[in-house]
Image (tube, rainbow, N blue to C red):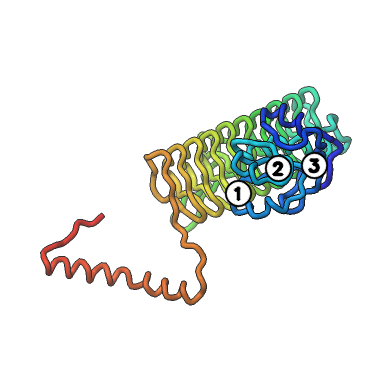
Amino acid sequence: MQHSIRRLKLSALAEQFELRYTGDGDTLIDGVGTLADATASQMTFLSNPAYRNQLEHTRAGAVVATAEDAENCPVNCLVADDPYVSYAKIAALFDTRRPRNPGIHPSASIDPTASLGNDVQVDANVVIGPGCEIADACTIGPGCVLIADCKLDTGSRLVANVTVCEGVSIGKRTIIHPGAVIGADGFGLAFDHDQWVKVPQLGSVQIGDDCEVGANTTIDRGAIGNTILENDVRIDNQVQIAHNVQIGAHTAMAGMVGIAGSTKIGKYCMFAGNSGAVGHIRIADRTTVQFRGVISKSIEEAGTVWSAALPALPLKEWQRTAVHLRKLDKLAKRIKKLEKQSGNQAEDD
């Protein structure tokens, strides 16, 4: 990563983020890097034990690490209970991207009935339709379209080429990344004898404060009520959220997750990549769904972990496993027959 123009003393960083430091507090930090590649003026971190073997060779100006790892750190260290969280907060100081530039680009098209607050940035080729309400300090990046009656609350940002459909409401400090579509029609269809009839999607989408929606993610509008994301929901790239889904606060979903319609997901849940849930079920708070796991029934107990996908195997091993899987039904029938003959039949789970 390129250097920022900021140069901050290690001791100042420690004081600002309430961390203890070891080494030379006068060391100047002007950017971030990886354990393997960081230079003497960059900060890095160690949180995953898989990278611990890189610590002894690092040439970073400082490493954010636990007290245990700090004992073996050959360079300056910022000691943190959770190095990744502390790193995230510090790294924000060295963001090299261009700062906001409030104002309205001459190529933007803004309906006269739309209202814009103070300190708003509207970039090139933006379209803001009738009845839209844009609060103070919002940023609407190039190519974004707000169709009609949308609300964007204070400090939120549409990065670029985001489409926000009719009646969508987005809370404070929320970030929507390029290509996301918020509030398109859900997949509502009724089959009438020999053809499909479209079910009107008359709800909208309501997104809370401090949320983040990844690139090319789609969040469908509700069929009757709204599709709802509560505060601090974090959605990765290429995720599909269907109509009338409700996602509880502080839940996170990795790339390519798919959530079918009318599913209600609790708070503090985590969905790993390519996982998902069928429609019309409830998922309790603090549920974790691992890679490729698909939840097919309601989960009532909070804090459980679910998994469904087998990890990749060498081809010949997988072929043997597949053969065994195909024989499971026959084996189960044989076991039941033997149990019946022995008079010791077990109850089905």
Q: Quadrant of residue 43?
A: top right
Q: Residue furthest right?
A: 106
Mark pair 2, 1: CA separation: 13 Å
Q: In the rendered image, which residue does mark 2 sit on?
A: 63
Q: In the rendered image, which residue does mark 1 sit on?
A: 48
Q: SS class of the residue under badge 3?
A: strand
Q: SS class of the residue under badge 1?
A: loop
Of callouts 3 and 1, the N-terminal one:
3
Looking at the figure, which quarter contains the C terminus?
Answer: bottom left
* Residue 242 visible in this rendered orientation of the protein: yes
Q: Residue sitting at 78 percent across and 31 percent down?
A: 111
Mark pair 2, 3: CA separation: 12 Å
* Disc 3 and disc 1 in contact, CB within 8 angstroms: no
Classify 208 as above or below 325.
above
* Residue 224 visible in this rendered orientation of the protein: no
Which amino acid is tagged 1?
A: Asn
In this view, the mark in front (2 or 3): 2
Which residue is nearer to you in this view: 183 or 61?
61
- For residue 182, the mark is none
Of callouts 2 and 1, the N-terminal one:
1
Q: How many marks?
A: 3
Which amino acid is tagged 3?
A: Gly
Q: In the rendered image, which residue does mark 3 sit on?
A: 31
State left or right for residue 295 relative to residue 333. Answer: right
